[in-house]
Amino acid sequence: MIKGIKISIVHDNRIFREGLRFFIEDQTDWCILHETGSGAEFMKLQINEFPDVVLMDINKPDKEGFNLATDFFSKYAQYNIKVIGLTMYANDSHIKSCKEAGISGCLLKKDIYKHLPEAVEEVINNKFYFTSCIQTKR
């Protein structure tokens, strides 16, 4: 497992964020730089140190997650930051939206603790990562 990866978390559910933070702090040598409850809040941050990977909730009825990814890449393109979308859905249109938004990987929320280390390592190495049940739909 790659050490020292800098992570930002964007998810509206505080309990989910806390669980994810606990997992990362307990099971990895990664550093959490930012943790926000919305895309708008994240984009307003005064970022002094940039993450390597953003773990972003993309399950929004208004597609906020996809729009945030697009805006994020526009604003911080020069930093080569990877985004892993966190989702509850694995349908073709969702996968297509991920790819169109420039998202490097997609994890089903139910599988996050099983696949997160592998997903982060893959996207850090400039590969795409989709959990297995999503891969079968690509």
Image: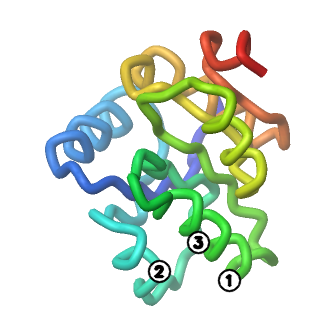
State how the image is colored. rainbow
- Identity of the residue drawn at 34% across and 78% down: 41
Please tell me which residue lies in front, 70 or 82.
70
Q: Which of the 4 quarters of the picture holds residue 59?
A: top left
Gap in angstroms between the C-alphas marked 2 and 1: 9 Å
Residue 136: horizontal and vertical position, in percent?
72, 10
Left or right: residue 57 versus residue 21 is: right
Which part of the image, by quadrant, shows the N terminus? top right
- Identity of the residue drawn at 67% across and 46% down: 98
Q: Do the residues labelled 2 and 3 touch (CB within 8 Å)?
A: no
Q: Do the residues labelled 2 and 1 touch (CB within 8 Å)?
A: yes
Question: Residue tagged by mark 2?
Answer: 43
Residue 5 drawn above or below residue 8: above
Question: Residue tagged by mark 1?
Answer: 75
Left or right: residue 20 versus residue 84 is: left
Given the image, on which type of amino acid does mark 1 rest?
A: Lys
Q: Which of marks 1 and 3 is nearer the N terminus?
A: 3
Q: Earlier in the sequence, mark 2 or mark 3?
A: 2
Residue 114 drawn above or below residue 19: above
Gap in angstroms between the C-alphas marked 1 and 3: 12 Å
Q: Which of the 4 quarters of the picture holds residue 85?
A: top right
Name the disc covering residue 50, or none: 3
